[in-house]
Amino acid sequence: MYSQGLIGAKTETTEDEAFLAAFQARIDAEEKIEPNDPMPEGYRRTLIRQIGQHAHSEIVGMLPEGNWITRAPSLRRKAALLAKVQDEGGHGLYLYSAAETLGVSREEMTEELLSGKAKYSSIFNYPTLTWADIGAIGWLVDGAAIMNQIPLCRCSYGPYARAMIRVCKEESFHQRQGYEIMMHLARGTAEQKELAQDALNRWWWPSLMMFGPSDTDSQHGDQSMKWKIKRFTNDELRQKFVDATVPQGEFIGLSFPDPDLKWNEDKGGYDFGAIDWDEFWRVVKGGGPMNRERIAARQKAWDEGAWVREAALAHARKRKARREAARMAAE
Amino acid sequence: MAGASTVSRQALTAFLLRLADDHLVLGHRLSEWCGHAPMLEEDLAMPNMALDLLGQARALYQYAATVEGAGRDEDQLAYLRREREFSNCLMAERENGDFAHTMLRQLYFAAFMEPAWQAMLSSSDEALAGIAAKAVKEVAYHIRHAGEWVVRLGDGTEESTRRMKAAVEALAPYVDELFESDDVTAAMAEAGIAADPAALRPAFDAIVGPIFAEAGLDWADVPYGQTGGRKGMHGEAMGYLLADLQFMQRSYPGAAW
Ligand SMILES: [Fe+2]
Ligand SMILES: [Fe+2]
Ligand SMILES: [Fe+2]
Protein backbone atom coordinates (compact mmCIF):
# COMPACT_ATOMS: atom_id res chain seq x y z
CA MET A 1 0.00 0.00 0.00
CA TYR A 2 2.22 2.60 0.88
CA SER A 3 5.40 4.28 1.93
CA GLN A 4 5.26 6.43 4.98
CA GLY A 5 7.15 9.65 5.29
CA LEU A 6 10.58 8.09 5.55
CA ILE A 7 11.86 7.52 9.02
CA GLY A 8 15.42 7.13 10.13
CA ALA A 9 17.43 7.16 6.90
CA LYS A 10 20.85 8.75 7.00
CA THR A 11 21.47 10.90 3.96
CA GLU A 12 25.09 11.84 4.84
CA THR A 13 27.47 10.97 2.12
CA THR A 14 31.28 11.09 1.76
CA GLU A 15 32.00 11.65 -1.93
CA ASP A 16 34.06 14.64 -3.06
CA GLU A 17 32.42 17.83 -4.15
CA ALA A 18 33.05 17.44 -7.87
CA PHE A 19 31.29 14.03 -7.83
CA LEU A 20 28.36 15.37 -5.87
CA ALA A 21 28.05 18.44 -8.09
CA ALA A 22 28.06 16.32 -11.25
CA PHE A 23 25.41 14.06 -9.75
CA GLN A 24 23.31 17.01 -8.69
CA ALA A 25 23.53 18.46 -12.20
CA ARG A 26 22.00 15.28 -13.60
CA ILE A 27 19.23 15.43 -10.99
CA ASP A 28 18.56 19.08 -11.74
CA ALA A 29 18.33 18.27 -15.44
CA GLU A 30 15.59 15.75 -14.54
CA GLU A 31 17.69 12.85 -15.85
CA LYS A 32 16.72 9.45 -14.46
CA ILE A 33 19.39 7.68 -12.43
CA GLU A 34 19.70 4.04 -13.49
CA PRO A 35 21.13 1.10 -11.51
CA ASN A 36 24.62 1.13 -13.02
CA ASP A 37 25.07 4.91 -12.91
CA PRO A 38 27.46 6.42 -10.38
CA MET A 39 25.55 7.70 -7.36
CA PRO A 40 26.43 9.01 -3.91
CA GLU A 41 26.39 6.36 -1.20
CA GLY A 42 23.87 8.45 0.75
CA TYR A 43 21.53 8.47 -2.24
CA ARG A 44 21.77 4.70 -2.60
CA ARG A 45 21.26 4.18 1.13
CA THR A 46 18.28 6.50 1.29
CA LEU A 47 16.61 4.76 -1.64
CA ILE A 48 17.25 1.27 -0.27
CA ARG A 49 15.73 2.37 2.99
CA GLN A 50 12.73 4.04 1.38
CA ILE A 51 11.99 1.36 -1.23
CA GLY A 52 12.51 -1.34 1.39
CA GLN A 53 10.11 0.40 3.78
CA HIS A 54 7.61 0.72 0.99
CA ALA A 55 7.94 -2.95 -0.02
CA HIS A 56 7.58 -4.10 3.60
CA SER A 57 4.49 -1.92 3.95
CA GLU A 58 2.86 -3.64 1.00
CA ILE A 59 3.60 -7.06 2.49
CA VAL A 60 2.66 -6.32 6.09
CA GLY A 61 -0.38 -4.48 4.72
CA MET A 62 -1.70 -7.80 3.40
CA LEU A 63 -2.31 -8.94 6.98
CA PRO A 64 -4.96 -6.50 8.28
CA GLU A 65 -7.00 -6.79 5.10
CA GLY A 66 -6.34 -10.51 4.75
CA ASN A 67 -8.02 -10.76 8.14
CA TRP A 68 -11.40 -10.21 6.41
CA ILE A 69 -11.10 -12.30 3.24
CA THR A 70 -12.75 -15.39 4.65
CA ARG A 71 -15.45 -13.27 6.34
CA ALA A 72 -16.27 -10.86 3.50
CA PRO A 73 -20.04 -10.28 3.54
CA SER A 74 -20.83 -11.09 -0.09
CA LEU A 75 -19.15 -13.09 -2.84
CA ARG A 76 -18.64 -9.96 -4.91
CA ARG A 77 -16.90 -8.18 -2.01
CA LYS A 78 -14.84 -11.28 -1.28
CA ALA A 79 -13.55 -11.44 -4.86
CA ALA A 80 -12.68 -7.73 -4.83
CA LEU A 81 -10.86 -8.01 -1.50
CA LEU A 82 -8.90 -11.10 -2.54
CA ALA A 83 -7.85 -9.33 -5.72
CA LYS A 84 -6.86 -6.23 -3.78
CA VAL A 85 -4.74 -8.10 -1.27
CA GLN A 86 -3.11 -9.97 -4.14
CA ASP A 87 -2.33 -6.64 -5.83
CA GLU A 88 -0.57 -5.48 -2.65
CA GLY A 89 1.60 -8.59 -2.75
CA GLY A 90 2.39 -7.76 -6.37
CA HIS A 91 3.40 -4.24 -5.34
CA GLY A 92 5.71 -5.75 -2.76
CA LEU A 93 7.28 -7.91 -5.44
CA TYR A 94 7.98 -5.02 -7.87
CA LEU A 95 9.35 -2.92 -5.05
CA TYR A 96 11.70 -5.62 -3.79
CA SER A 97 12.87 -5.99 -7.38
CA ALA A 98 13.44 -2.22 -7.62
CA ALA A 99 15.46 -2.33 -4.37
CA GLU A 100 17.47 -5.30 -5.66
CA THR A 101 18.77 -3.09 -8.48
CA LEU A 102 20.59 -1.16 -5.73
CA GLY A 103 22.48 -4.23 -4.58
CA VAL A 104 20.40 -5.52 -1.68
CA SER A 105 18.65 -8.90 -1.78
CA ARG A 106 15.05 -9.67 -0.87
CA GLU A 107 16.32 -12.07 1.81
CA GLU A 108 18.43 -9.35 3.43
CA MET A 109 15.49 -6.95 3.39
CA THR A 110 13.18 -9.59 4.84
CA GLU A 111 15.62 -10.27 7.64
CA GLU A 112 15.77 -6.57 8.45
CA LEU A 113 11.98 -6.43 8.58
CA LEU A 114 11.82 -9.41 10.93
CA SER A 115 14.58 -8.13 13.20
CA GLY A 116 12.83 -4.77 13.49
CA LYS A 117 15.72 -2.95 11.84
CA ALA A 118 13.61 -1.95 8.86
CA LYS A 119 10.30 -0.19 9.36
CA TYR A 120 6.99 -0.44 7.56
CA SER A 121 4.06 1.92 7.52
CA SER A 122 2.72 2.23 11.06
CA ILE A 123 -0.86 2.30 9.87
CA PHE A 124 -0.74 -1.48 9.68
CA ASN A 125 -0.15 -1.70 13.40
CA TYR A 126 -3.82 -0.95 13.96
CA PRO A 127 -6.33 -3.82 13.92
CA THR A 128 -9.18 -4.39 11.43
CA LEU A 129 -12.10 -4.85 13.80
CA THR A 130 -15.10 -4.76 11.50
CA TRP A 131 -15.93 -5.14 7.82
CA ALA A 132 -16.13 -1.35 7.54
CA ASP A 133 -12.40 -1.21 8.22
CA ILE A 134 -11.90 -2.74 4.78
CA GLY A 135 -13.76 0.21 3.30
CA ALA A 136 -11.88 2.71 5.46
CA ILE A 137 -8.48 1.24 4.58
CA GLY A 138 -9.18 1.35 0.85
CA TRP A 139 -10.55 4.86 1.01
CA LEU A 140 -8.11 6.43 3.47
CA VAL A 141 -4.97 4.31 3.50
CA ASP A 142 -4.82 3.66 -0.23
CA GLY A 143 -5.92 7.28 -0.68
CA ALA A 144 -2.99 8.52 1.39
CA ALA A 145 -0.72 6.12 -0.48
CA ILE A 146 -1.71 7.68 -3.78
CA MET A 147 -0.92 11.18 -2.51
CA ASN A 148 2.55 9.97 -1.61
CA GLN A 149 3.12 7.84 -4.65
CA ILE A 150 1.98 10.05 -7.49
CA PRO A 151 4.97 12.33 -6.99
CA LEU A 152 7.15 9.22 -6.66
CA CYS A 153 6.29 8.39 -10.28
CA ARG A 154 8.71 11.26 -11.03
CA CYS A 155 11.33 10.11 -8.51
CA SER A 156 14.88 10.57 -9.82
CA TYR A 157 15.66 6.86 -9.48
CA GLY A 158 14.37 5.19 -12.66
CA PRO A 159 13.41 1.70 -11.41
CA TYR A 160 11.47 3.15 -8.45
CA ALA A 161 9.68 5.72 -10.61
CA ARG A 162 8.66 3.05 -13.11
CA ALA A 163 7.42 0.69 -10.40
CA MET A 164 5.33 3.54 -8.97
CA ILE A 165 3.60 4.22 -12.27
CA ARG A 166 2.29 0.70 -12.35
CA VAL A 167 1.45 0.65 -8.66
CA CYS A 168 -0.39 3.98 -8.67
CA LYS A 169 -2.97 2.78 -11.19
CA GLU A 170 -3.89 -0.09 -8.92
CA GLU A 171 -3.87 2.02 -5.77
CA SER A 172 -6.37 4.45 -7.24
CA PHE A 173 -8.61 1.53 -8.13
CA HIS A 174 -8.31 0.35 -4.50
CA GLN A 175 -9.15 3.81 -3.24
CA ARG A 176 -12.34 4.02 -5.31
CA GLN A 177 -13.32 0.51 -4.28
CA GLY A 178 -12.83 1.36 -0.59
CA TYR A 179 -14.81 4.54 -0.92
CA GLU A 180 -17.59 2.62 -2.62
CA ILE A 181 -17.73 0.22 0.36
CA MET A 182 -17.97 3.21 2.72
CA MET A 183 -20.66 4.85 0.61
CA HIS A 184 -22.68 1.67 0.57
CA LEU A 185 -22.45 1.35 4.36
CA ALA A 186 -23.12 5.03 4.99
CA ARG A 187 -26.31 4.77 2.94
CA GLY A 188 -27.32 1.39 4.36
CA THR A 189 -29.10 0.46 7.59
CA ALA A 190 -28.49 2.42 10.81
CA GLU A 191 -26.18 -0.37 11.96
CA GLN A 192 -24.17 -0.20 8.76
CA LYS A 193 -23.83 3.56 8.98
CA GLU A 194 -22.57 3.14 12.52
CA LEU A 195 -19.95 0.66 11.29
CA ALA A 196 -18.77 3.17 8.70
CA GLN A 197 -18.60 6.06 11.17
CA ASP A 198 -16.78 3.98 13.75
CA ALA A 199 -14.21 2.91 11.14
CA LEU A 200 -13.64 6.51 10.05
CA ASN A 201 -13.25 7.55 13.68
CA ARG A 202 -10.54 4.96 14.24
CA TRP A 203 -8.65 5.27 10.95
CA TRP A 204 -8.68 9.03 10.36
CA TRP A 205 -5.84 10.12 12.64
CA PRO A 206 -3.57 7.17 11.85
CA SER A 207 -4.11 7.96 8.15
CA LEU A 208 -2.90 11.53 8.67
CA MET A 209 0.14 10.14 10.47
CA MET A 210 1.00 8.09 7.37
CA PHE A 211 2.63 11.18 5.84
CA GLY A 212 5.27 11.09 8.53
CA PRO A 213 6.54 13.68 11.00
CA SER A 214 5.78 17.32 10.50
CA ASP A 215 8.29 19.16 8.31
CA THR A 216 9.65 21.03 11.29
CA ASP A 217 10.67 17.70 12.88
CA SER A 218 11.85 15.79 9.86
CA GLN A 219 15.64 15.86 9.53
CA HIS A 220 16.32 14.19 6.22
CA GLY A 221 13.59 15.86 4.17
CA ASP A 222 15.77 18.52 2.59
CA GLN A 223 18.37 16.21 1.11
CA SER A 224 15.70 13.83 -0.23
CA MET A 225 14.00 16.80 -1.88
CA LYS A 226 17.27 18.03 -3.34
CA TRP A 227 17.94 14.61 -4.84
CA LYS A 228 14.35 14.54 -6.11
CA ILE A 229 13.57 11.32 -4.32
CA LYS A 230 10.77 13.32 -2.74
CA ARG A 231 8.96 16.14 -4.48
CA PHE A 232 6.74 17.43 -1.70
CA THR A 233 7.16 17.72 2.03
CA ASN A 234 5.23 15.57 4.47
CA ASP A 235 3.01 18.47 5.49
CA GLU A 236 2.26 19.45 1.90
CA LEU A 237 1.13 15.94 1.09
CA ARG A 238 -0.89 15.69 4.29
CA GLN A 239 -2.70 18.91 3.41
CA LYS A 240 -3.49 17.66 -0.10
CA PHE A 241 -4.89 14.47 1.39
CA VAL A 242 -7.12 16.30 3.86
CA ASP A 243 -8.38 18.64 1.16
CA ALA A 244 -9.24 15.75 -1.16
CA THR A 245 -10.74 13.47 1.46
CA VAL A 246 -12.92 15.67 3.67
CA PRO A 247 -15.45 16.52 0.93
CA GLN A 248 -15.69 12.82 0.04
CA GLY A 249 -16.58 11.93 3.63
CA GLU A 250 -19.08 14.76 3.93
CA PHE A 251 -20.68 13.75 0.65
CA ILE A 252 -21.65 10.38 2.11
CA GLY A 253 -22.82 11.90 5.38
CA LEU A 254 -19.95 10.87 7.63
CA SER A 255 -18.28 13.20 10.10
CA PHE A 256 -14.59 13.47 10.89
CA PRO A 257 -13.35 12.99 14.45
CA ASP A 258 -11.73 16.42 14.59
CA PRO A 259 -13.57 19.41 16.10
CA ASP A 260 -10.96 21.77 14.62
CA LEU A 261 -11.50 20.64 11.06
CA LYS A 262 -12.86 23.52 9.01
CA TRP A 263 -12.50 25.10 5.61
CA ASN A 264 -10.10 28.04 5.50
CA GLU A 265 -11.04 30.33 2.66
CA ASP A 266 -7.77 32.28 2.79
CA LYS A 267 -5.48 29.31 2.33
CA GLY A 268 -7.93 27.48 0.08
CA GLY A 269 -7.68 24.35 2.18
CA TYR A 270 -8.85 22.82 5.43
CA ASP A 271 -7.44 23.63 8.83
CA PHE A 272 -7.23 20.59 11.05
CA GLY A 273 -6.43 19.76 14.65
CA ALA A 274 -3.09 18.80 16.14
CA ILE A 275 -1.81 15.30 15.43
CA ASP A 276 -0.90 13.25 18.48
CA TRP A 277 2.79 12.76 17.72
CA ASP A 278 3.29 10.84 20.95
CA GLU A 279 0.96 8.18 19.60
CA PHE A 280 2.78 8.25 16.28
CA TRP A 281 6.20 7.65 17.83
CA ARG A 282 4.84 5.06 20.24
CA VAL A 283 3.46 3.03 17.32
CA VAL A 284 6.61 3.50 15.20
CA LYS A 285 8.71 2.26 18.10
CA GLY A 286 6.68 -0.90 18.54
CA GLY A 287 3.92 0.09 20.96
CA GLY A 288 0.93 -0.01 18.61
CA PRO A 289 -1.86 -2.51 19.19
CA MET A 290 -0.67 -4.90 16.48
CA ASN A 291 3.11 -4.42 16.09
CA ARG A 292 3.99 -7.71 17.75
CA GLU A 293 1.32 -9.70 15.95
CA ARG A 294 2.26 -8.34 12.54
CA ILE A 295 5.93 -9.22 12.88
CA ALA A 296 5.08 -12.53 14.52
CA ALA A 297 2.85 -13.43 11.56
CA ARG A 298 5.60 -12.56 9.06
CA GLN A 299 8.16 -14.46 11.15
CA LYS A 300 5.91 -17.51 11.30
CA ALA A 301 5.33 -17.50 7.53
CA TRP A 302 9.08 -17.12 6.98
CA ASP A 303 10.08 -19.87 9.43
CA GLU A 304 7.38 -22.31 8.39
CA GLY A 305 8.14 -21.67 4.73
CA ALA A 306 11.86 -22.40 5.10
CA TRP A 307 11.54 -26.10 4.25
CA VAL A 308 9.55 -25.22 1.11
CA ARG A 309 12.15 -22.74 -0.10
CA GLU A 310 14.95 -25.19 0.65
CA ALA A 311 13.13 -27.97 -1.20
CA ALA A 312 12.67 -25.76 -4.27
CA LEU A 313 16.42 -25.03 -4.33
CA ALA A 314 17.35 -28.65 -3.73
CA HIS A 315 15.06 -29.82 -6.51
CA ALA A 316 16.47 -27.25 -8.93
CA ARG A 317 20.00 -28.47 -8.12
CA LYS A 318 19.01 -32.10 -8.65
CA ARG A 319 17.42 -31.31 -12.00
CA LYS A 320 20.47 -29.45 -13.15
CA ALA A 321 22.75 -32.30 -12.10
CA ARG A 322 20.56 -34.84 -13.91
CA ARG A 323 20.52 -32.73 -17.08
CA GLU A 324 24.29 -32.44 -17.00
CA ALA A 325 24.71 -36.16 -16.38
CA ALA A 326 22.44 -36.92 -19.33
CA ARG A 327 24.42 -34.56 -21.54
CA MET A 328 27.72 -36.16 -20.50
CA ALA A 329 26.35 -39.60 -21.21
CA ALA A 330 25.19 -38.51 -24.64
CA GLU A 331 28.56 -37.06 -25.60
CA MET B 1 -31.09 -24.32 -19.68
CA ALA B 2 -31.16 -26.77 -22.53
CA GLY B 3 -30.96 -29.69 -20.15
CA ALA B 4 -34.22 -28.76 -18.45
CA SER B 5 -36.29 -30.58 -20.98
CA THR B 6 -34.74 -33.92 -20.13
CA VAL B 7 -33.70 -33.52 -16.53
CA SER B 8 -35.59 -32.33 -13.48
CA ARG B 9 -35.00 -28.81 -12.29
CA GLN B 10 -34.29 -30.26 -8.87
CA ALA B 11 -31.56 -32.63 -10.09
CA LEU B 12 -29.83 -29.92 -12.12
CA THR B 13 -29.94 -27.53 -9.17
CA ALA B 14 -28.48 -30.20 -6.92
CA PHE B 15 -25.69 -30.89 -9.41
CA LEU B 16 -24.83 -27.20 -9.82
CA LEU B 17 -24.79 -26.66 -6.06
CA ARG B 18 -22.36 -29.54 -5.55
CA LEU B 19 -20.00 -28.08 -8.05
CA ALA B 20 -20.43 -24.55 -6.69
CA ASP B 21 -19.89 -25.71 -3.11
CA ASP B 22 -16.72 -27.57 -4.12
CA HIS B 23 -15.30 -24.40 -5.64
CA LEU B 24 -16.40 -22.04 -2.90
CA VAL B 25 -15.11 -24.23 -0.09
CA LEU B 26 -11.76 -25.03 -1.71
CA GLY B 27 -11.31 -21.36 -2.64
CA HIS B 28 -12.02 -20.45 0.99
CA ARG B 29 -9.34 -22.83 2.21
CA LEU B 30 -6.82 -21.53 -0.29
CA SER B 31 -7.58 -17.93 0.64
CA GLU B 32 -6.72 -18.70 4.27
CA TRP B 33 -3.08 -18.73 3.15
CA CYS B 34 -3.20 -15.15 1.92
CA GLY B 35 -0.36 -13.22 3.55
CA HIS B 36 1.10 -16.34 5.19
CA ALA B 37 2.63 -18.21 2.25
CA PRO B 38 6.16 -19.70 2.27
CA MET B 39 7.32 -17.12 -0.29
CA LEU B 40 5.98 -13.99 -1.87
CA GLU B 41 5.41 -15.69 -5.23
CA GLU B 42 2.99 -18.07 -3.50
CA ASP B 43 1.29 -15.15 -1.78
CA LEU B 44 0.35 -14.16 -5.32
CA ALA B 45 -0.28 -17.61 -6.80
CA MET B 46 -2.61 -18.95 -4.10
CA PRO B 47 -4.98 -15.94 -4.09
CA ASN B 48 -4.88 -16.15 -7.86
CA MET B 49 -6.15 -19.73 -7.79
CA ALA B 50 -8.59 -18.86 -5.02
CA LEU B 51 -9.99 -16.10 -7.22
CA ASP B 52 -10.45 -18.54 -10.10
CA LEU B 53 -12.31 -20.93 -7.82
CA LEU B 54 -14.45 -18.15 -6.39
CA GLY B 55 -15.27 -16.89 -9.88
CA GLN B 56 -16.34 -20.39 -10.93
CA ALA B 57 -18.38 -20.79 -7.74
CA ARG B 58 -20.18 -17.52 -8.41
CA ALA B 59 -21.02 -18.45 -11.99
CA LEU B 60 -22.35 -21.80 -10.78
CA TYR B 61 -24.39 -20.34 -7.90
CA GLN B 62 -25.87 -17.70 -10.16
CA TYR B 63 -26.89 -20.31 -12.65
CA ALA B 64 -28.16 -22.61 -9.89
CA ALA B 65 -30.29 -19.73 -8.60
CA THR B 66 -31.82 -19.28 -12.04
CA VAL B 67 -32.51 -22.99 -12.47
CA GLU B 68 -33.91 -23.33 -8.97
CA GLY B 69 -36.28 -20.43 -9.60
CA ALA B 70 -36.95 -19.91 -5.90
CA GLY B 71 -35.87 -16.27 -5.81
CA ARG B 72 -32.54 -16.98 -4.11
CA ASP B 73 -29.34 -15.33 -5.31
CA GLU B 74 -25.67 -16.34 -5.21
CA ASP B 75 -25.16 -14.88 -1.74
CA GLN B 76 -28.19 -16.59 -0.25
CA LEU B 77 -26.95 -19.88 -1.64
CA ALA B 78 -23.44 -19.38 -0.28
CA TYR B 79 -24.21 -17.65 3.00
CA LEU B 80 -27.58 -18.86 4.17
CA ARG B 81 -27.55 -22.60 3.67
CA ARG B 82 -26.66 -24.75 6.65
CA GLU B 83 -23.93 -27.28 6.98
CA ARG B 84 -26.08 -30.30 6.15
CA GLU B 85 -27.22 -28.54 2.97
CA PHE B 86 -23.66 -28.07 1.71
CA SER B 87 -22.81 -30.84 -0.75
CA ASN B 88 -19.12 -30.25 -1.45
CA CYS B 89 -16.76 -33.20 -1.55
CA LEU B 90 -14.72 -33.85 1.59
CA MET B 91 -11.45 -33.19 -0.29
CA ALA B 92 -12.39 -29.52 -0.78
CA GLU B 93 -12.96 -28.87 2.91
CA ARG B 94 -9.85 -30.61 4.25
CA GLU B 95 -7.84 -28.20 6.36
CA ASN B 96 -4.77 -26.63 4.77
CA GLY B 97 -2.18 -28.47 6.82
CA ASP B 98 1.27 -27.64 5.54
CA PHE B 99 2.10 -26.40 2.05
CA ALA B 100 2.54 -29.99 0.81
CA HIS B 101 -1.02 -30.87 1.85
CA THR B 102 -2.40 -27.72 0.27
CA MET B 103 -0.68 -28.27 -3.06
CA LEU B 104 -1.59 -31.95 -3.22
CA ARG B 105 -5.24 -31.17 -2.42
CA GLN B 106 -5.15 -28.57 -5.20
CA LEU B 107 -3.66 -31.03 -7.66
CA TYR B 108 -6.25 -33.69 -6.84
CA PHE B 109 -9.17 -31.35 -7.23
CA ALA B 110 -7.84 -29.79 -10.43
CA ALA B 111 -7.08 -33.22 -11.91
CA PHE B 112 -10.66 -34.22 -11.12
CA MET B 113 -12.16 -31.04 -12.59
CA GLU B 114 -10.02 -30.83 -15.72
CA PRO B 115 -11.68 -33.79 -17.50
CA ALA B 116 -15.02 -32.81 -15.95
CA TRP B 117 -14.83 -29.32 -17.49
CA GLN B 118 -13.54 -30.78 -20.75
CA ALA B 119 -16.65 -32.94 -20.95
CA MET B 120 -18.89 -29.99 -20.04
CA LEU B 121 -17.51 -28.00 -22.99
CA SER B 122 -19.91 -29.99 -25.11
CA SER B 123 -22.69 -30.10 -22.52
CA SER B 124 -26.26 -30.15 -23.77
CA ASP B 125 -26.70 -27.30 -21.29
CA GLU B 126 -25.34 -24.20 -22.99
CA ALA B 127 -25.00 -22.13 -19.85
CA LEU B 128 -22.84 -24.80 -18.27
CA ALA B 129 -20.77 -25.16 -21.46
CA GLY B 130 -20.11 -21.41 -21.21
CA ILE B 131 -18.89 -21.70 -17.62
CA ALA B 132 -16.71 -24.66 -18.63
CA ALA B 133 -15.07 -22.71 -21.45
CA LYS B 134 -13.56 -20.25 -18.99
CA ALA B 135 -12.87 -22.78 -16.24
CA VAL B 136 -11.00 -25.23 -18.44
CA LYS B 137 -8.21 -22.72 -19.05
CA GLU B 138 -7.94 -21.83 -15.37
CA VAL B 139 -7.84 -25.43 -14.18
CA ALA B 140 -4.98 -26.20 -16.59
CA TYR B 141 -2.90 -23.60 -14.75
CA HIS B 142 -3.86 -25.09 -11.37
CA ILE B 143 -2.65 -28.50 -12.48
CA ARG B 144 0.61 -27.04 -13.72
CA HIS B 145 1.23 -24.95 -10.62
CA ALA B 146 0.25 -27.53 -8.02
CA GLY B 147 1.83 -30.34 -10.03
CA GLU B 148 5.17 -28.53 -10.18
CA TRP B 149 5.11 -28.12 -6.41
CA VAL B 150 4.26 -31.77 -5.84
CA VAL B 151 7.31 -32.67 -7.94
CA ARG B 152 9.60 -30.15 -6.23
CA LEU B 153 8.55 -31.18 -2.77
CA GLY B 154 8.45 -34.91 -3.50
CA ASP B 155 11.93 -34.74 -5.05
CA GLY B 156 13.40 -31.96 -2.91
CA THR B 157 14.96 -32.42 0.52
CA GLU B 158 14.55 -35.23 2.98
CA GLU B 159 12.09 -33.12 4.95
CA SER B 160 10.00 -32.11 1.94
CA THR B 161 9.81 -35.72 0.74
CA ARG B 162 8.67 -36.82 4.18
CA ARG B 163 6.01 -34.10 4.26
CA MET B 164 4.83 -34.85 0.73
CA LYS B 165 4.45 -38.53 1.56
CA ALA B 166 2.52 -37.61 4.69
CA ALA B 167 0.19 -35.49 2.56
CA VAL B 168 -0.40 -38.42 0.19
CA GLU B 169 -1.29 -40.59 3.19
CA ALA B 170 -3.54 -37.97 4.73
CA LEU B 171 -5.53 -37.12 1.60
CA ALA B 172 -5.79 -40.63 0.14
CA PRO B 173 -9.08 -41.47 1.90
CA TYR B 174 -10.82 -38.57 0.15
CA VAL B 175 -9.87 -39.35 -3.46
CA ASP B 176 -12.43 -42.03 -4.30
CA GLU B 177 -15.36 -39.88 -3.22
CA LEU B 178 -14.68 -37.55 -6.13
CA PHE B 179 -15.61 -40.29 -8.58
CA GLU B 180 -18.79 -41.53 -6.92
CA SER B 181 -21.93 -41.69 -9.01
CA ASP B 182 -25.49 -41.40 -7.72
CA ASP B 183 -28.96 -40.48 -9.01
CA VAL B 184 -27.97 -36.86 -9.59
CA THR B 185 -24.84 -37.62 -11.60
CA ALA B 186 -26.65 -40.40 -13.49
CA ALA B 187 -29.37 -37.94 -14.53
CA MET B 188 -26.71 -35.45 -15.71
CA ALA B 189 -24.86 -38.09 -17.69
CA GLU B 190 -28.04 -39.36 -19.29
CA ALA B 191 -29.10 -35.86 -20.36
CA GLY B 192 -25.65 -35.12 -21.78
CA ILE B 193 -25.14 -32.31 -19.27
CA ALA B 194 -22.03 -33.64 -17.53
CA ALA B 195 -19.88 -36.76 -17.52
CA ASP B 196 -20.45 -39.57 -15.06
CA PRO B 197 -17.77 -38.97 -12.38
CA ALA B 198 -16.69 -42.61 -12.52
CA ALA B 199 -15.76 -42.08 -16.17
CA LEU B 200 -13.33 -39.31 -15.19
CA ARG B 201 -11.04 -41.58 -13.20
CA PRO B 202 -8.76 -42.67 -16.06
CA ALA B 203 -8.14 -39.04 -17.04
CA PHE B 204 -7.40 -38.17 -13.40
CA ASP B 205 -4.92 -41.03 -13.16
CA ALA B 206 -3.31 -39.93 -16.42
CA ILE B 207 -2.73 -36.46 -14.94
CA VAL B 208 -1.62 -37.43 -11.45
CA GLY B 209 0.34 -40.58 -12.40
CA PRO B 210 3.21 -38.93 -14.28
CA ILE B 211 3.46 -36.19 -11.63
CA PHE B 212 3.76 -38.80 -8.90
CA ALA B 213 6.34 -40.70 -10.97
CA GLU B 214 8.45 -37.58 -11.36
CA ALA B 215 8.04 -36.72 -7.69
CA GLY B 216 8.99 -40.24 -6.62
CA LEU B 217 5.65 -40.74 -4.87
CA ASP B 218 3.53 -43.86 -4.63
CA TRP B 219 -0.21 -44.07 -4.17
CA ALA B 220 -1.16 -44.79 -0.59
CA ASP B 221 -3.31 -47.80 0.20
CA VAL B 222 -6.78 -46.82 1.26
CA PRO B 223 -8.40 -49.54 3.30
CA TYR B 224 -11.27 -47.25 4.31
CA GLY B 225 -12.22 -44.41 1.99
CA GLN B 226 -14.28 -41.54 3.39
CA THR B 227 -17.51 -40.35 1.84
CA GLY B 228 -20.62 -38.37 2.67
CA GLY B 229 -19.92 -34.85 1.43
CA ARG B 230 -22.47 -35.03 -1.37
CA LYS B 231 -25.11 -35.92 1.23
CA GLY B 232 -24.12 -33.07 3.52
CA MET B 233 -22.11 -35.16 5.96
CA HIS B 234 -18.89 -33.26 6.50
CA GLY B 235 -15.86 -33.28 8.72
CA GLU B 236 -15.85 -31.48 12.07
CA ALA B 237 -13.84 -28.61 10.62
CA MET B 238 -16.63 -27.72 8.18
CA GLY B 239 -18.78 -26.00 10.80
CA TYR B 240 -15.95 -23.63 11.63
CA LEU B 241 -15.38 -22.91 7.96
CA LEU B 242 -19.04 -21.94 7.58
CA ALA B 243 -19.05 -19.95 10.81
CA ASP B 244 -16.23 -17.91 9.33
CA LEU B 245 -17.67 -17.67 5.82
CA GLN B 246 -21.20 -16.82 6.92
CA PHE B 247 -20.41 -14.63 9.93
CA MET B 248 -21.50 -11.30 8.46
CA GLN B 249 -24.71 -12.53 6.86
CA ARG B 250 -25.67 -14.29 10.08
CA SER B 251 -24.81 -11.26 12.23
CA TYR B 252 -26.74 -8.75 10.13
CA PRO B 253 -29.71 -10.66 8.74
CA GLY B 254 -31.10 -9.15 5.56
CA ALA B 255 -28.49 -6.42 5.15
CA ALA B 256 -27.02 -5.81 1.69
CA TRP B 257 -23.28 -5.29 1.34
FE1 LIG C 1 1.88 1.36 -2.04
FE1 LIG D 1 -0.08 -1.34 -2.73
FE1 LIG E 1 -3.57 -0.66 -2.47
Image: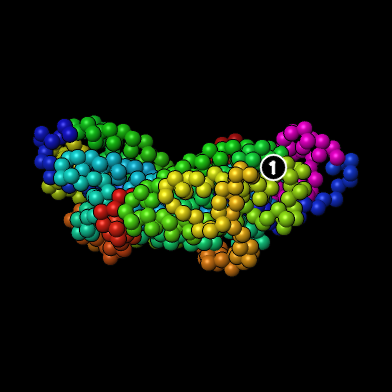
Query: Residue A96, how many percent across, how many down?
Result: 61, 47
Which sits in the foreground, A245 or A329?
A245
Where's residue A172, x and y in %? 51, 41
Disc 1: which residue: A231
- Quarter-wise, where is residue B204 in the image? top left
Q: Is residue B50 magenta?
A: no
Q: Give the residue at x 38% y 58%.
A: A194
At mark 1, the secondary structure is loop
Q: Does the rendering let one see residue A237?
A: yes
Q: Is residue B166 left or right of residue A295?
A: left
Q: Is residue B4 left or right of residue B97?
A: left
Q: Where the N terminus of chain B falls, by quadrant?
A: top left
Amino acid at pointer 1: Arg
The residue at the point 52 percent across, 65 percent down is: A290
Residue A309 in percent (x, y) is at: 54, 54
- At x 63%, y 66%, the residue is A278
Image position of B79 (left or right of A258): left
Nearest the eye: B128 or A60: A60
- Name the image quarter holding residue A225: top right
Describe the colour scheme in one phrase. rainbow
The span picked out in magenta is A21-48
- Which of B106 and B3 lies nearest the eye of the viewer? B3
- Where residue A193 sits: x, y (%)? 37, 55
Q: In front: B194, or B175?
A: B194
Q: Chain of mark 1?
A: A
What residue sits 53% from the left and 67% below the top?
Answer: A289
Is residue A46 inside the magenta stretch? yes
- What is the tally of numbered marks visible in this picture? 1
